[in-house]
Image (tube, coloured by chain):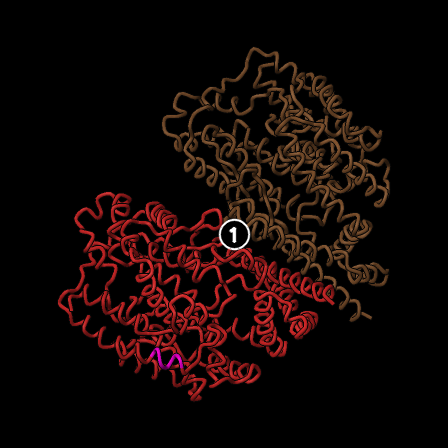
Chain colours: A red, B brown
Amino acid sequence: MTTAYEQTLQTFKDKMKEIKSYEEALAVLYWDMRTGAPRKGLNTRSEAIGVLSGESFKLATSQELGELLTRLEEKDANDQLSDLDRRLVAETRKDYDRSVKIPPKLYQEYVVLTSQSESAWEEAKEKGNYEEFEPYLDKIITYTNQFIDLWGVKATRYDTLLDQYEPGMTVAELDRVFGGLRDKLVPLASAIAASPHQPNTGFLRQQYPKEAQKSFSLFILEQMGFDFQAGRLDESVHPFATGLNTGDVRITTRYLTDDVTSALFGTIHEGGHALYEQNLMEELTGTTLATGTSMGIHESQSRFWENVIGRSRPFWERYYGDLRSRFPGQFDEVPVEDFYRATNVVQPSLIRIEADELTYNLHIIIRYEIEKLIFNEGVKAKDLPAIWNEKYREYLGVVPSNNGDGVLQDVHWSGGAFGYFPSYSLGNMYAAQIADTLERELPNFWQLVSEGNLIPIKQWLTERVYKWGKARTPSEIIVGTTGKPLDPSHLVTYLERKYKDIYKL
Amino acid sequence: MTTAYEQTLQTFKDKMKEIKSYEEALAVLYWDMRTGAPRKGLNTRSEAIGVLSGESFKLATSQELGELLTRLEEKDANDQLSDLDRRLVAETRKDYDRSVKIPPKLYQEYVVLTSQSESAWEEAKEKGNYEEFEPYLDKIITYTNQFIDLWGVKATRYDTLLDQYEPGMTVAELDRVFGGLRDKLVPLASAIAASPHQPNTGFLRQQYPKEAQKSFSLFILEQMGFDFQAGRLDESVHPFATGLNTGDVRITTRYLTDDVTSALFGTIHEGGHALYEQNLMEELTGTTLATGTSMGIHESQSRFWENVIGRSRPFWERYYGDLRSRFPGQFDEVPVEDFYRATNVVQPSLIRIEADELTYNLHIIIRYEIEKLIFNEGVKAKDLPAIWNEKYREYLGVVPSNNGDGVLQDVHWSGGAFGYFPSYSLGNMYAAQIADTLERELPNFWQLVSEGNLIPIKQWLTERVYKWGKARTPSEIIVGTTGKPLDPSHLVTYLERKYKDIYKL
């Protein structure tokens, strides 16, 4: 009996490793395409990606894998599994069922549709012409509704979509936390806009040589404890992080010569993602648990390092001198307090990806509310621009003059990624809640930051968050780390404390 | 009838594309490992490479592919094939038979052996301790002899090995051409060594900033017609070229700050390989014919650009000013003639990869003669150091003081690559023969070089060599380009003309 069970487990793990190998190869191919693969090779490259993706999907949905799972789920076998292996089986089952429930033909149609749709979106956005994109969006919504039916409707239809990116997250929970957040942030943003104490940002508009920016980015990553033996920093138009395996986690940034903050905070942000993936425990290697537990928890780490640490006064008390020395003369007349305030300007605006850490959440809440309308209330694609503009007026006090700066601004919907947006604000809330615990459990937390002693912070996060990967659920991570479920009041308190000080409210 | 045939052909081509996709993915993974993949990820990366290589080998040896080949080889179908498709079928058959003739278990043992052997070689070379490596070499020779029996013995046992790298090449042919070469080059090298007119090379030992070297490398590649939309230049410890597809051909170089010629000629060499792969005709895309026709012809292109063009007087008459301007003050006192002579020093030495373009051929002939002794005369691994040292004394007048600088110097044998070495000198001979034709058919050939007008030369080579890829055999290429079979007298004439001038003989 035992031998048969052990054999089944080994065969199952070998299958997992095979799937992981394809995922690693594909991740290298994508990384390469985004960091400088020659333009003329991209068509052939796409074919190679198609072949490998197809094979990987075949492995992940094979009857053999289904049978292995069934055998490992039988009580006799399941009782013998280690906690980690039981978790691996359960997670694999979830992915397996999700994949096999979609008929291959339907999925194939959908892949073609979203690929066309992304091109259509790009063109429509450029022209600000929503009508061009609307029929694609309409079809994507129809397909997504079919998927919801095939996967099974949870508490609401939109709950089914949320679960893809944030396992266990619900509309009921998001309504609660986003409601609390919105009610506090809208008046706070208004008060900030009305403050006479606006930071001076003129000195941020100089020319900053790329090499000096790069040197500072590498220096800060090193300070954060980024392991350059297990990762690298490159350049790409849209910065990203990708963990090929725990020993190879790659991030990118983008150097703008007229904006020193773009690459700097972009690097710290992606560096936060990278610390997560570099510090997964070794037992997860070669399994599908070797990754972040959810988009929201992943984003909490990028935002913790970028905003809570990187945009804090103690951080710049320590590192401003290093920045200054890399740009001789350019910051001589700028006191550290002015620099700190300039990197924390709050300004309601139209574009999510350019938003500050406060109003950013309002951009997300708008998208969340619209996605709920689409899937739970049956709102149609044609109605979205009007809804979008009205919500921007209400929450942010600004209205786009064309749809390119409005409803067309994000790539997500063109690729069918409904349910993804909430992750970004969940990340902010998780980050603030974790920071609150950190302040209490590492009593000298801010002193460590002001001394540039960031490694103990990384180690604390490794023990609580990073090492577990997908072996714990998002809710297990947040309760295990902070002692209680997600509580939006921490983000509110954090933002109020920070911005009432900066804007002297 | 026609429909069935067309379907078979299409299925066959789809299989080919699938195999090509795996090859492209593997080439990206290898390129990435050699240009900066983080150290700690390499173990997991090796597993991914193992999985993909295994799958690729399965595809290339599948029964299905064998059956498709058989059907396309039947007279009815074969008569309907285009010339190119007929060639593709024939080439695929050759690879297929070669692969399926080795029992998977035997091949697996051999893969493990060579991987252990390469590590053993590295250590043995470091210590100069041949006895450590000898048992591995012994086993590799035994396995290789088994492969020869399985593949089938051609005119001699060693002929079977040669055919892997230079299809159609024979021992009889190599004896003829290498014999002619050796008899002329040994006395020429002696006369050069005795000449009182030795070039001054002292000025080559300065410090050359890496960025300036890189800028010059990129400039020269551009001058050669390297397409940066279809390729890139990176850095690696051992320079190489890899064609992922015709639109993505990557080369690397190595910048030594105390030697300006290393990266320079290395870049031109790999650039020559790249021009070949970038200029394959479009009809070959997605087939296994989309690569160089043999190692020798490939090497002829790297050596043509590096030696015939890059180490010529007209080349430096045109480009010396560009080099000077990148290293202000460093070459002010050095006339172009001195620089030209310094880059063409001939000096019999122990190490192949550091040899000049004349004595290099003697290093190759020694290896060729030893490989023939092993496979055609049954000479044993234990006898090799003595034979090696005796041949170095005879042909080059130098004897290694330890085996690390002698019989252990090359990686090739540790990986079982017997039959590969002759390609290097074949490359030199092909290059000289092609240059001879070029001089006659482009009457202003050297004027073009001295004007920095290299594109017509690239175009001429594209028409004669590059575009055909593997759709023509090496011998078809050389006869088609120069009007006659391989003739070693062109290399002899070229070397005599060049070095009698430089050394005033």
Name the residue furthest bottom: A377
The residue under label 1 is which amino acid type? Answer: Gly
Residue B436 seen: no
Q: Nearer the viewer, residue B341 or B445?
A: B341
Give the vertical position of B362 relative to B437 (above or below). Answer: above
Instruction: Give the chain of mark 1.
Output: A
Q: Position of residue A42 (x, y in %)?
A: 54, 58
Q: Nearer the viewer, residue B340 or A181?
A: A181
Q: Position of residue A198 (x, y in %)?
A: 17, 64
**Helix or strand or loop: what does disc 1 sit on?**
loop
Name the residue furthest left: A196
- Side of A375 relative to A437 (left or right): right
Q: Quadrant of residue B189?
A: top right
Q: Nearer the viewer, residue A197 or B489?
A: A197
Give the vertical position of A383 relative to A439 (above or below). Answer: below
Residue B10 seen: yes
> Main SS type for the magenta part?
helix
Residue in the image at 48% along x and 78% along y: A161
Q: Which residues are magenta?
A: A173-178
Does the magenta-highlighted stretch encompass residue A176? yes
Which residue is under mark 1?
A247
Give the vertical position of A351 relative to A157 (above or below). Answer: above
